[in-house]
Image (cartoon, coloured by chain):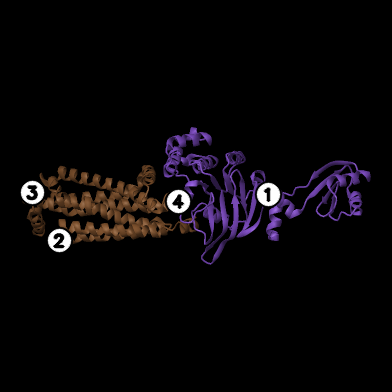
Chain colours: A purple, B brown
Amino acid sequence: MLEADSLTKTFGPRLAVEHVSFDVHAGEIFALVGPNGAGKTTTLRMLAGLIHPSSGAVRFRGQPTAGAESTLRAGIGFLTEAPGLWDRLTVRQNLSVHARLHGLPQPDRAVDAAMDLFGVADRAAEPAAVLSKGLRQRVALARALLHDPGAVLLDEPTSGLDPESARDVRELIVRLRHERRAVLISTHNLDEVDRLADRVALLNTRLVALDTPQSLRARAFGARVRVRFAGPADAYARTLSDEGLADVRADGHTLSIGLDGAGLQTPDIVRRLVAAGAAIEAVEPEEPSLEQVYLRLLRGGGS
Amino acid sequence: MNWSRVMALLGKELADLRGRPGIFFPGLFTGGVAILLPVFVAILVPAFTGERLSDSADLQVALELYRQQPGARALDPEAAIQASLFQQFLVLLVLSPVAAAMSIAAYSVIGEKQARTLEPLLATPLTTFELLLAKTLGAFLPALALSFLCFGLDLAVAAIFAAPGVAPALLTPRALGVLFLMGPMASLTALSLAVCVSSRVNDARSAQQLAVLVVLPITGLLIAQIAAGFVVSMPIILAITGVLALVNLGLMRLGVSLFDRETILTRWK
């Protein structure tokens, strides 16, 4: 649906984005993560047709967008980092101006539908200035989706929101996936990425890694299993080492076992531990947080 | 160009202005001064000093200027000098829409930048020309309305305070040319300059300062009229209007080329 093809952007001597390539499919939530200054917003702006890449290309629905940025902007919904509502205008007026700028055939009907969908219809006549941050974000989201875009770019969609408002926004984002839109989120909230994203791109001027959250975990830490015992785990660490497992870490009543290259799978390990007399309370796959994955990949430069 | 997009943004500009009546203060103040100055010079000063205008040797030139006008109404010397003074100060009335336009236009782009509302706007299919045209019209139309209002007030003041016949004497082709040809063109020039500058700076005052360049020639015209007995005749009005129209076309093109979306988005935060 929306494709970045070797996008590079320089601002004077500063390289902001270097040879970044990915595509976002319809019905997919694609997360762009990275440290401050990594080029996330610049990438989003290039994809939204707001700034020109120094080299590389953006393709929307398979078509290059160079020279047709106005058409690209008509097909994309862009939630900017700041909601950017006109404070003196009412919610309805804010949306109505954008509906008309997008040339919608029935702007008033589109505005009514958007306000209903985003739960702001009861605030339609209020100036944007009096809205809470969460409501402003809802209105901004409604504005980004007024023209029924095929691809939606969301820059820090839950930044600064209270937990309830953030949850509402996340639900709206999931709804976009159900509606088969291509959704690209730029965020620092890795917990949110873990909950929402089908694929994650780690950006640090260039693309450090791109995969599903599960695959990124496996790439950064390998597959691991955690076993909890009724008693101390030290003795069973030795048992497994004797079985040829090299990556076994004991911590109190718990063992953390690396499976990559072990030659054994979880049922085999459990069978050997039980045979050694272990009283096992729980066995579960060990999942490092996405934050741990992020930090490891970023420090390691990806793989 | 898509007119419906221009009209959509123009509607927003006008709606936004309704919430900021203070932005009209510079235009209203300038208009007020332009309306009151001839009252002070032509009516209050003679009333307080007890000296008739027609008795002053210095003001005979005003009488001559009035009588030289083709088709001038027949007025007694006192009323003719009053009419001449009111006519001279009409040029100053042009400053009212110029001041209003500058004030509005300087904030039109910079205000959007500072409120961070420009990026969502730029993310729509709106082209740079459409954006600047809507911004220009959004400042020009209220300024033009202010110009009409001030002229109406000027006529009312002349009708109430000046001698009979002075107010109708202001409704000459020359006066109307000054107010409704030269004035709007000067306003457009000022606000085009303000829009050009506000595309490149992040401070409304900088935009206003440069737009003051338009005020200087207008003030110069007034001084030339009073000091040198020079009359801004209809051919001169038409010539100035024509030159300003050409300048405006150039400024609009310059504005489009100066409006660098990338710099605006990446530099101004």
Can residue B267 be seen?
yes
Q: Nearer the viewer, mark 4 or mark 3?
A: 4
Q: CA distance from mark 2 to mark 1?
A: 80 Å
Q: Which residue is mark 2?
A: B230
| Circles 2, 1 touching at the beta carbon (< 8 Å) | no
Q: Position of residue A38 (x, y in %)?
A: 60, 58
Q: How far apart, in angstroms, are the residues tagged by discs 2 and 3?
A: 20 Å
User: Mark 2 belongs to which amino acid?
Assistant: Phe
Looking at the rendered structure, the number of numbered marks drawn on it comes to 4
The answer as to whether the residues below labels 4 and 3 share one chain is no
Q: Mark 1: which amino acid?
A: Thr
Q: Residue furthest front?
A: A62
Gap in Å between the C-alphas at discs 3 and 1?
87 Å
Q: Earlier in the sequence, mark 2 or mark 3?
A: 3
Report in which chain the residue with disc 3 lies.
B
Residue type at numbered disc 4: Ser
Q: Residue B218's x, y, as percent?
A: 24, 58
| Residue positioned 12% across, 50% down in the render | B83
Q: Find numbered disc 1 in the image and state the secondary structure of the residue it sits on.
A: loop
Q: Is residue A124 visible?
A: no
Residue A70 marker: 4
Q: Residue furthest top?
A: A122
- Circle 3 sits on which residue? B73
Chain under numbered label 2: B
Horizontal side, residue A134 vs residue B193: left or right: right
